[in-house]
Image (cartoon, rainbow, N blue to C red):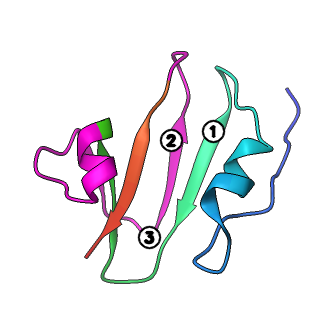
Amino acid sequence: MSIIQYGGWDTSSYLQTWASSLTFSVGDNLIFQYPPNHNGIEVSKADYDSCQPSNPIQSYNDDATTIPLTLAGKRYFIVGQ
């Protein structure tokens, strides 16, 4: 198994440009790091588009979350407070 690190996205990055240059595969891990007193939330596309976690799929509260990609398909994440 090899480890490939992509430059991280942050608030100064244009998300669409950053994401369009990347391809993730089953077996990869996403690592989210966020400030204290924030959390990572996996949401539906509708909640992602509205940036509102009205029905969260999963919430992560450990400031550095590793999410294994075990299935193909799109997943959506936002950061909450």
Element class at badge 3: loop
What's the residue type where badge 3 is placed?
Asp
What's the residue type where badge 1 is placed?
Asn
Q: Are marks 2 and 3 in contact (CB under 8 Å)?
A: no
User: Where are the magenta residues, as a range?
Assistant: 46-73
Between residues 13 and 62, which one lies in front from this camera angle?
Answer: 13
Magenta stretch: residue 72 in it?
yes
How far apart marks 2 and 1 lie (CA) works out to: 5 Å
How far apart marks 2 and 3 lie (CA) works out to: 13 Å
Q: Residues within 10 Å of mark 1 (few under 14, many from 20)?
A: some
Answer yes or no: is residue 59 visible: no
Mark sitting earlier along the chain (2/1): 1
Element class at badge 1: strand
Above or below for 53 versus 3: below
Counting from the top left corner in percent of width and height, residue 56 is at 19, 45
Between residues 22 and 3, which one lies in front from this camera angle?
Answer: 22
How far apart marks 1 and 3 lie (CA) works out to: 16 Å
Above or below for 45 versus 38: above
Counting from the top left corner in percent of width and height, residue 81 is at 25, 76
Answer yes or no: is residue 35 visible: yes
Residue at figure coordinates x 19%, y 54% from the top left? 53
| Residue most extreme to the left | 54
Counting from the top left corner in percent of width and height, residue 24 is at 70, 31
Residue at figure coordinates x 77%, y 41% from the top left? 22
The residue beneath circle 2 is: 67
The residue beneath circle 3 is: 63
| Residue most extreme to the top | 72
Residue at figure coordinates x 60%, y 45% from the top left? 30
Between residues 71 and 62, which one lies in front from this camera angle?
Answer: 71
Q: Is residue 35 left or right of residue 32?
A: left
- Residue 4 found in image quarter: top right
The residue beneath circle 1 is: 29
